[in-house]
Amino acid sequence: MTVIRLITIIWILFLTTSCTNAPSAWHHDNRADQTYIVMESSLRLDKMPKTSGELGSIYHGSLILDSQRDLPANLMIESLAVKQNGHTWLIDGDTLDVNVLSLNRWEVRFTWQLPITAEKPANVALMIKYQGHKEWLVDKEVPIDIIN
């Protein structure tokens, strides 16, 4: 009986830490040092009724990466983190849409169900990788717009 209880406790600890561990660099800002990239984020909560009649709780995010120089073609988007009320949710980079608006301006978009509230702003962090170097771009206190 104690082995099952121990496994249950370990599993609960794993689940709670996997959604609450913040990236190691929430103290960063929205500028990358090596490539001089500035990130501007916007978040929207879609509360429009769906065809099934249920109200939606889907968040849409748009992150604009802007640089004075051309963004490198081999710049990789590794992951995205959203933080609110002490909890952090990670979204894998493979699930993000990247649109090249111009050579020095990209848009990273996502649609995700997140257990956050639209009444409070959230912090958004994007991990980029360039030439083996990883860096977080962090946009703090991003307001969440509501689509009714």
Image (tube, helix red, strand yellow):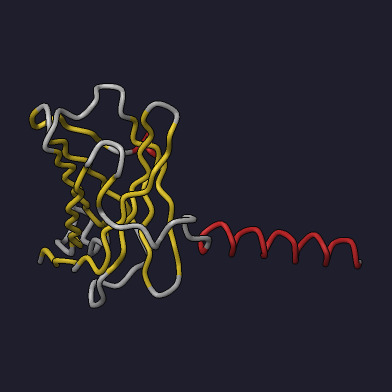
The image shows residue 77, relative to residue 55, as above or below, that is above
Q: Residue at x 83, y 64 (%)?
A: 6
Question: Which residue is situated farthest in the top direction here?
Answer: 73
Residue 96 occupies which quadrant of the picture?
top left
Total marks shown come to: 0
The image shows residue 34, relative to residue 47, as above or below, that is above
Q: Is residue 14 left or right of residue 76?
A: right
Question: Which residue is situated farthest in the front direction here?
Answer: 34
Residue 91: image location, x then y, percent: 40, 47
Q: Which quarter of the image is occupied by the C terminus?
A: bottom left
Q: Which residue is at the front of the view, 120 or 138? A: 138
Residue 100: image location, x then y, percent: 14, 29
Q: Is residue 76 left or right of residue 40?
A: right
Q: Which residue is at the front of the view, 114 or 121? A: 121
Residue 65: image location, x then y, percent: 18, 42
Q: Which quarter of the image is occupied by the N terminus?
A: bottom right
Residue 147 occupies which quadrant of the picture?
bottom left
The image shows residue 143, relative to residue 30, as above or below, that is below
Q: Which residue is at the front of the view, 70 or 93? A: 70
Q: Residue at x 30, y 29 (%)?
A: 75
Residue 108: image location, x then y, percent: 22, 41
Q: Residue at x 13, y 31 (%)?
A: 69
Q: Which residue is at the front of the view, 73 or 52? A: 73
Q: Residue at x 37, y 44 (%)?
A: 127
